[in-house]
Image (cartoon, helix red, strand yellow):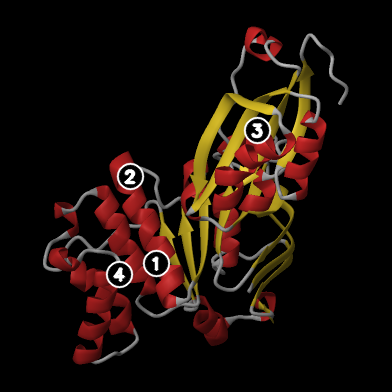
Amino acid sequence: MITVENVSKSFPGTTASGSPVLALRDVNVEISAGALYGVVGAAGSGKSTLARCIALQERPDRGVVRLDGLNTASLDGKRLREVRRQVGVVGARQELHAERTVAGNVAAPLELLGLDGPQRKSRVGKLLDLVGLTQRAAQRPSELTVGQQRRVAVARALAASPAVLLADDPTAGVAPEETGAVLTVLDRARAELGATVLVTTQEASVVRRVCDEIGVLEDGSITESGSVLDLLADPSSRTARSLLPAIETTPAQVAKYDRSVDIVLVGFAAVGALLPEASARFGVELATIGGGLTRVGDTPVARFRLGLRGEQADAAMAWISERGGHVTHTARGPQGVAA
Protein backbone atom coordinates (compact mmCIF):
# COMPACT_ATOMS: atom_id res chain seq x y z
CA MET A 1 0.00 0.00 0.00
CA ILE A 2 1.10 3.58 -0.73
CA THR A 3 0.06 6.22 1.77
CA VAL A 4 0.62 9.93 1.23
CA GLU A 5 -0.04 11.90 4.41
CA ASN A 6 -0.38 15.69 4.40
CA VAL A 7 2.37 16.13 1.81
CA SER A 8 3.30 19.66 0.76
CA LYS A 9 6.08 20.59 -1.63
CA SER A 10 7.30 23.97 -2.86
CA PHE A 11 10.01 25.14 -5.23
CA PRO A 12 11.97 28.41 -5.42
CA GLY A 13 9.94 31.08 -7.18
CA THR A 14 10.58 32.03 -10.78
CA THR A 15 8.53 35.24 -10.68
CA ALA A 16 9.97 38.72 -10.13
CA SER A 17 8.88 38.58 -6.49
CA GLY A 18 10.84 35.38 -5.93
CA SER A 19 7.96 33.84 -3.96
CA PRO A 20 8.06 30.04 -3.67
CA VAL A 21 5.81 28.02 -5.98
CA LEU A 22 3.62 25.70 -3.92
CA ALA A 23 3.27 22.55 -6.03
CA LEU A 24 1.50 20.31 -3.48
CA ARG A 25 -0.76 21.41 -0.64
CA ASP A 26 -1.47 18.92 2.17
CA VAL A 27 -2.09 16.04 -0.22
CA ASN A 28 -3.55 12.84 1.22
CA VAL A 29 -3.78 9.71 -0.94
CA GLU A 30 -4.19 6.00 -0.16
CA ILE A 31 -3.42 3.49 -2.91
CA SER A 32 -4.32 -0.11 -2.21
CA ALA A 33 -1.82 -2.85 -2.97
CA GLY A 34 -2.46 -4.21 -6.44
CA ALA A 35 -4.59 -1.25 -7.54
CA LEU A 36 -4.30 0.71 -10.75
CA TYR A 37 -4.67 4.26 -9.44
CA GLY A 38 -4.97 7.38 -11.57
CA VAL A 39 -3.93 10.88 -10.51
CA VAL A 40 -5.74 13.20 -12.91
CA GLY A 41 -5.18 16.90 -13.38
CA ALA A 42 -4.34 19.65 -15.82
CA ALA A 43 -0.80 20.67 -16.67
CA GLY A 44 0.73 22.40 -13.65
CA SER A 45 -1.64 20.78 -11.15
CA GLY A 46 1.23 19.01 -9.33
CA LYS A 47 0.89 15.50 -10.79
CA SER A 48 4.55 15.04 -11.68
CA THR A 49 5.70 16.49 -8.36
CA LEU A 50 3.48 14.02 -6.50
CA ALA A 51 4.86 11.22 -8.66
CA ARG A 52 8.46 12.19 -7.87
CA CYS A 53 7.68 12.33 -4.14
CA ILE A 54 6.16 8.84 -4.24
CA ALA A 55 9.14 7.58 -6.28
CA LEU A 56 11.45 9.07 -3.59
CA GLN A 57 13.05 11.36 -6.17
CA GLU A 58 11.87 14.44 -4.23
CA ARG A 59 11.54 14.97 -0.50
CA PRO A 60 8.36 16.73 0.65
CA ASP A 61 8.68 19.95 2.66
CA ARG A 62 6.10 18.52 5.04
CA GLY A 63 4.23 15.27 5.36
CA VAL A 64 5.10 11.63 4.87
CA VAL A 65 5.12 9.07 2.05
CA ARG A 66 4.77 5.51 3.33
CA LEU A 67 5.42 2.40 1.26
CA ASP A 68 3.84 -0.63 2.93
CA GLY A 69 3.90 1.30 6.20
CA LEU A 70 7.57 2.30 5.94
CA ASN A 71 8.15 5.99 6.67
CA THR A 72 10.40 6.95 3.76
CA ALA A 73 11.25 10.36 5.26
CA SER A 74 13.73 8.65 7.57
CA LEU A 75 15.66 6.93 4.77
CA ASP A 76 19.00 7.94 3.35
CA GLY A 77 22.10 6.44 1.78
CA LYS A 78 22.07 2.75 0.97
CA ARG A 79 18.67 2.09 2.52
CA LEU A 80 17.08 4.86 0.42
CA ARG A 81 18.59 3.37 -2.75
CA GLU A 82 17.26 -0.07 -1.82
CA VAL A 83 13.73 1.21 -1.31
CA ARG A 84 13.86 3.29 -4.49
CA ARG A 85 14.43 0.07 -6.42
CA GLN A 86 10.97 -1.04 -5.28
CA VAL A 87 9.47 1.74 -7.44
CA GLY A 88 9.84 1.41 -11.20
CA VAL A 89 9.40 4.73 -12.99
CA VAL A 90 8.28 5.46 -16.54
CA GLY A 91 8.44 9.14 -17.52
CA ALA A 92 6.79 10.76 -20.52
CA ARG A 93 10.21 11.98 -21.69
CA GLN A 94 12.31 9.13 -20.42
CA GLU A 95 15.00 8.36 -22.98
CA LEU A 96 16.04 4.89 -24.04
CA HIS A 97 19.69 4.12 -24.77
CA ALA A 98 19.94 4.83 -28.51
CA GLU A 99 22.99 2.61 -28.99
CA ARG A 100 21.34 -0.43 -27.40
CA THR A 101 18.77 -2.79 -28.87
CA VAL A 102 15.30 -3.10 -27.39
CA ALA A 103 16.43 -6.19 -25.48
CA GLY A 104 19.57 -4.38 -24.35
CA ASN A 105 17.55 -1.50 -22.94
CA VAL A 106 15.40 -3.88 -20.91
CA ALA A 107 18.50 -5.75 -19.73
CA ALA A 108 20.34 -2.62 -18.52
CA PRO A 109 18.88 -2.58 -14.96
CA LEU A 110 19.55 -6.29 -14.61
CA GLU A 111 23.20 -5.78 -15.52
CA LEU A 112 23.49 -3.21 -12.74
CA LEU A 113 22.02 -5.77 -10.33
CA GLY A 114 24.64 -8.32 -11.41
CA LEU A 115 22.29 -10.94 -12.85
CA ASP A 116 24.12 -13.52 -14.95
CA GLY A 117 23.52 -13.93 -18.67
CA PRO A 118 20.97 -16.79 -18.67
CA GLN A 119 18.88 -15.14 -15.95
CA ARG A 120 18.96 -11.81 -17.77
CA LYS A 121 17.94 -13.39 -21.04
CA SER A 122 15.02 -15.22 -19.43
CA ARG A 123 13.79 -12.12 -17.62
CA VAL A 124 14.09 -9.90 -20.70
CA GLY A 125 12.21 -12.46 -22.80
CA LYS A 126 9.31 -12.56 -20.33
CA LEU A 127 9.07 -8.76 -20.18
CA LEU A 128 9.18 -8.32 -23.95
CA ASP A 129 6.38 -10.86 -24.20
CA LEU A 130 4.42 -8.91 -21.57
CA VAL A 131 4.69 -5.67 -23.56
CA GLY A 132 4.11 -7.38 -26.92
CA LEU A 133 7.49 -6.56 -28.45
CA THR A 134 9.24 -9.93 -28.67
CA GLN A 135 9.63 -9.53 -32.43
CA ARG A 136 11.34 -6.14 -31.94
CA ALA A 137 14.03 -7.37 -29.54
CA ALA A 138 16.95 -6.80 -31.93
CA GLN A 139 15.84 -3.38 -33.18
CA ARG A 140 17.06 0.03 -32.01
CA PRO A 141 14.73 2.53 -30.32
CA SER A 142 14.94 4.81 -33.37
CA GLU A 143 13.22 2.10 -35.42
CA LEU A 144 10.17 2.07 -33.13
CA THR A 145 7.10 4.27 -32.88
CA VAL A 146 6.64 6.47 -29.80
CA GLY A 147 4.08 4.03 -28.43
CA GLN A 148 6.46 1.11 -28.86
CA GLN A 149 9.26 3.07 -27.20
CA ARG A 150 6.98 3.76 -24.25
CA ARG A 151 6.24 0.04 -23.94
CA VAL A 152 9.98 -0.69 -23.93
CA ALA A 153 10.35 1.88 -21.14
CA VAL A 154 7.65 0.05 -19.16
CA ALA A 155 9.48 -3.26 -19.63
CA ARG A 156 12.74 -1.66 -18.47
CA ALA A 157 11.02 -0.17 -15.40
CA LEU A 158 9.69 -3.64 -14.54
CA ALA A 159 13.02 -5.41 -15.01
CA ALA A 160 14.02 -5.37 -11.33
CA SER A 161 10.57 -6.66 -10.25
CA PRO A 162 9.45 -3.51 -8.41
CA ALA A 163 6.43 -3.62 -6.14
CA VAL A 164 5.22 -0.28 -7.56
CA LEU A 165 5.15 0.91 -11.17
CA LEU A 166 4.80 4.66 -11.52
CA ALA A 167 3.89 5.92 -15.00
CA ASP A 168 4.03 9.71 -15.29
CA ASP A 169 1.80 10.76 -18.21
CA PRO A 170 2.49 7.52 -20.11
CA THR A 171 0.36 8.38 -23.15
CA ALA A 172 1.84 11.87 -23.74
CA GLY A 173 2.95 12.16 -27.35
CA VAL A 174 1.64 8.69 -28.23
CA ALA A 175 -0.53 8.41 -31.33
CA PRO A 176 -4.20 7.73 -30.54
CA GLU A 177 -4.11 4.35 -32.26
CA GLU A 178 -1.25 3.25 -29.96
CA THR A 179 -2.61 4.57 -26.68
CA GLY A 180 -4.61 1.41 -26.01
CA ALA A 181 -1.52 -0.79 -26.33
CA VAL A 182 0.40 1.30 -23.78
CA LEU A 183 -2.49 1.20 -21.29
CA THR A 184 -2.94 -2.54 -21.81
CA VAL A 185 0.69 -3.06 -20.82
CA LEU A 186 0.14 -1.13 -17.57
CA ASP A 187 -2.91 -3.23 -16.82
CA ARG A 188 -0.98 -6.43 -17.51
CA ALA A 189 1.79 -5.30 -15.14
CA ARG A 190 -0.83 -5.13 -12.41
CA ALA A 191 -2.75 -8.27 -13.34
CA GLU A 192 0.15 -10.61 -14.23
CA LEU A 193 3.04 -9.30 -12.14
CA GLY A 194 1.07 -8.09 -9.13
CA ALA A 195 2.52 -4.58 -9.28
CA THR A 196 0.68 -1.62 -7.78
CA VAL A 197 0.39 0.83 -10.68
CA LEU A 198 0.14 4.61 -10.30
CA VAL A 199 -0.64 6.61 -13.45
CA THR A 200 -0.63 10.40 -13.74
CA THR A 201 -2.52 11.84 -16.66
CA GLN A 202 -4.42 14.76 -18.09
CA GLU A 203 -6.67 12.46 -20.11
CA ALA A 204 -10.05 11.26 -18.85
CA SER A 205 -9.89 8.44 -21.41
CA VAL A 206 -6.96 6.89 -19.50
CA VAL A 207 -9.09 6.68 -16.35
CA ARG A 208 -12.01 5.24 -18.29
CA ARG A 209 -9.90 2.47 -19.78
CA VAL A 210 -7.78 1.15 -16.93
CA CYS A 211 -8.11 2.83 -13.51
CA ASP A 212 -9.85 1.31 -10.48
CA GLU A 213 -9.38 4.32 -8.23
CA ILE A 214 -8.73 7.99 -8.86
CA GLY A 215 -7.53 11.19 -7.23
CA VAL A 216 -8.31 14.51 -8.92
CA LEU A 217 -5.55 17.08 -8.41
CA GLU A 218 -6.21 20.81 -8.84
CA ASP A 219 -3.66 23.50 -7.99
CA GLY A 220 -1.72 21.06 -5.83
CA SER A 221 -4.72 19.81 -3.82
CA ILE A 222 -6.78 16.62 -4.07
CA THR A 223 -10.36 17.73 -4.71
CA GLU A 224 -11.99 14.28 -4.91
CA SER A 225 -10.86 10.69 -4.68
CA GLY A 226 -12.20 7.17 -4.48
CA SER A 227 -13.39 4.30 -6.64
CA VAL A 228 -14.02 5.43 -10.22
CA LEU A 229 -17.38 3.62 -10.32
CA ASP A 230 -18.46 5.14 -7.00
CA LEU A 231 -17.60 8.65 -8.21
CA LEU A 232 -19.52 8.07 -11.43
CA ALA A 233 -22.61 7.42 -9.34
CA ASP A 234 -22.49 11.07 -8.21
CA PRO A 235 -23.38 13.16 -11.30
CA SER A 236 -22.04 16.28 -9.58
CA SER A 237 -18.51 14.88 -9.24
CA ARG A 238 -15.80 16.06 -11.60
CA THR A 239 -15.12 12.44 -12.50
CA ALA A 240 -18.72 11.95 -13.58
CA ARG A 241 -18.71 15.18 -15.58
CA SER A 242 -15.54 14.05 -17.37
CA LEU A 243 -16.42 10.43 -18.05
CA LEU A 244 -20.19 10.09 -18.37
CA PRO A 245 -21.87 10.61 -21.75
CA ALA A 246 -23.17 14.12 -22.32
CA ILE A 247 -26.92 14.76 -22.25
CA GLU A 248 -28.41 17.03 -24.86
CA THR A 249 -32.17 17.44 -25.09
CA THR A 250 -34.55 20.15 -26.23
CA PRO A 251 -37.56 21.52 -24.32
CA ALA A 252 -39.77 20.06 -27.04
CA GLN A 253 -38.48 16.54 -26.34
CA VAL A 254 -39.14 16.88 -22.59
CA ALA A 255 -42.59 18.43 -23.12
CA LYS A 256 -43.89 15.19 -24.63
CA TYR A 257 -43.77 13.50 -21.22
CA ASP A 258 -45.15 14.05 -17.73
CA ARG A 259 -41.60 14.81 -16.61
CA SER A 260 -37.99 13.79 -17.13
CA VAL A 261 -35.25 12.40 -14.92
CA ASP A 262 -31.53 11.79 -15.33
CA ILE A 263 -30.32 8.33 -14.38
CA VAL A 264 -26.89 6.68 -14.05
CA LEU A 265 -26.70 2.89 -14.34
CA VAL A 266 -23.52 0.92 -13.56
CA GLY A 267 -22.91 -2.71 -14.49
CA PHE A 268 -24.24 -5.27 -16.96
CA ALA A 269 -27.40 -6.12 -15.02
CA ALA A 270 -28.37 -2.51 -14.36
CA VAL A 271 -27.71 -1.27 -17.90
CA GLY A 272 -29.33 -4.25 -19.58
CA ALA A 273 -32.39 -4.96 -17.46
CA LEU A 274 -33.49 -2.30 -14.96
CA LEU A 275 -35.33 0.05 -17.31
CA PRO A 276 -37.40 -2.52 -19.26
CA GLU A 277 -38.19 -4.43 -16.07
CA ALA A 278 -39.34 -1.27 -14.25
CA SER A 279 -41.48 -0.27 -17.23
CA ALA A 280 -43.22 -3.66 -17.33
CA ARG A 281 -43.56 -4.00 -13.55
CA PHE A 282 -45.18 -0.59 -13.00
CA GLY A 283 -46.92 -0.08 -16.31
CA VAL A 284 -45.12 3.16 -17.14
CA GLU A 285 -43.42 4.51 -20.22
CA LEU A 286 -39.68 5.14 -19.81
CA ALA A 287 -38.34 6.72 -23.00
CA THR A 288 -34.65 7.49 -23.51
CA ILE A 289 -34.47 11.05 -24.84
CA GLY A 290 -30.79 11.82 -24.22
CA GLY A 291 -27.46 10.49 -22.99
CA GLY A 292 -25.71 7.29 -23.93
CA LEU A 293 -23.46 4.37 -22.98
CA THR A 294 -19.75 4.10 -22.22
CA ARG A 295 -17.39 1.63 -20.57
CA VAL A 296 -15.13 2.04 -17.58
CA GLY A 297 -12.63 -0.79 -17.88
CA ASP A 298 -14.86 -3.78 -18.60
CA THR A 299 -17.91 -2.31 -16.86
CA PRO A 300 -20.72 -0.75 -18.91
CA VAL A 301 -21.98 2.59 -17.58
CA ALA A 302 -24.98 4.54 -18.87
CA ARG A 303 -26.29 8.03 -18.27
CA PHE A 304 -29.71 8.68 -19.75
CA ARG A 305 -32.33 11.37 -19.64
CA LEU A 306 -35.66 9.58 -19.46
CA GLY A 307 -39.07 10.88 -20.36
CA LEU A 308 -41.65 9.43 -17.94
CA ARG A 309 -45.34 8.84 -18.54
CA GLY A 310 -47.67 6.92 -16.20
CA GLU A 311 -49.28 7.10 -12.77
CA GLN A 312 -46.65 4.90 -11.10
CA ALA A 313 -43.60 6.69 -12.50
CA ASP A 314 -42.42 7.68 -9.01
CA ALA A 315 -42.74 4.11 -7.79
CA ALA A 316 -40.78 2.89 -10.81
CA MET A 317 -37.95 5.36 -10.11
CA ALA A 318 -37.88 4.39 -6.42
CA TRP A 319 -37.66 0.72 -7.41
CA ILE A 320 -34.75 1.45 -9.75
CA SER A 321 -32.97 3.45 -7.02
CA GLU A 322 -33.30 0.54 -4.57
CA ARG A 323 -31.51 -1.65 -7.11
CA GLY A 324 -28.52 0.61 -7.63
CA GLY A 325 -29.73 3.14 -10.20
CA HIS A 326 -28.88 6.74 -9.40
CA VAL A 327 -31.83 9.01 -10.20
CA THR A 328 -31.83 12.81 -10.33
CA HIS A 329 -35.20 14.49 -10.78
CA THR A 330 -35.17 17.21 -13.41
CA ALA A 331 -37.86 18.97 -15.43
CA ARG A 332 -41.63 18.47 -15.20
CA GLY A 333 -43.76 18.26 -18.28
CA PRO A 334 -46.93 20.19 -18.97
CA GLN A 335 -49.05 17.90 -16.79
CA GLY A 336 -47.05 18.76 -13.66
CA VAL A 337 -46.84 15.29 -12.18
CA ALA A 338 -45.73 15.59 -8.54
CA ALA A 339 -42.24 14.40 -7.74
Q: Are marks 2 and 4 in contact (CB under 8 Å)?
A: no
Residue sitting at 63 percent across and 34 percent down?
241
Distance from disc 1 to disc 4, alpha carbons, whole Å, reads 7 Å
Q: Which residue is mark 1?
A: 188
Marked residue nearer the N-terminal end (2 or 3):
3
Q: Which percent across, then down, holds residue 80?
A: 56, 80
Q: Which residue is mark 4?
A: 130
Q: Which percent across, then down, holds residue 26?
A: 76, 55
In the displayed structure, would residue 73 be above or below residue 300?
below
Foreground of the two, 122 or 237:
237
Q: Amino acid at mark 2?
A: Val
Q: Amino acid at mark 3?
A: Ala
Distance from disc 3 to disc 4, alpha carbons, whole Å, reads 49 Å
| Mark nearer the viewer, 3 or 4 | 4
Dot 2: within a 10 Å radius of its alpha carbon, few (fewer than 14), some, or many (20 or more) residues?
some
Q: Are marks 1 and 4 in contact (CB under 8 Å)?
A: yes
In this rendering, would 159 be left or right of 332?
Answer: left
Q: Which percent across, then down, holds residue 76?
A: 60, 81
Q: Amino acid at mark 1?
A: Arg
**Quadrant in the picture for the N terminus:** bottom right
Marked residue nearer the N-terminal end (3 or 1):
3
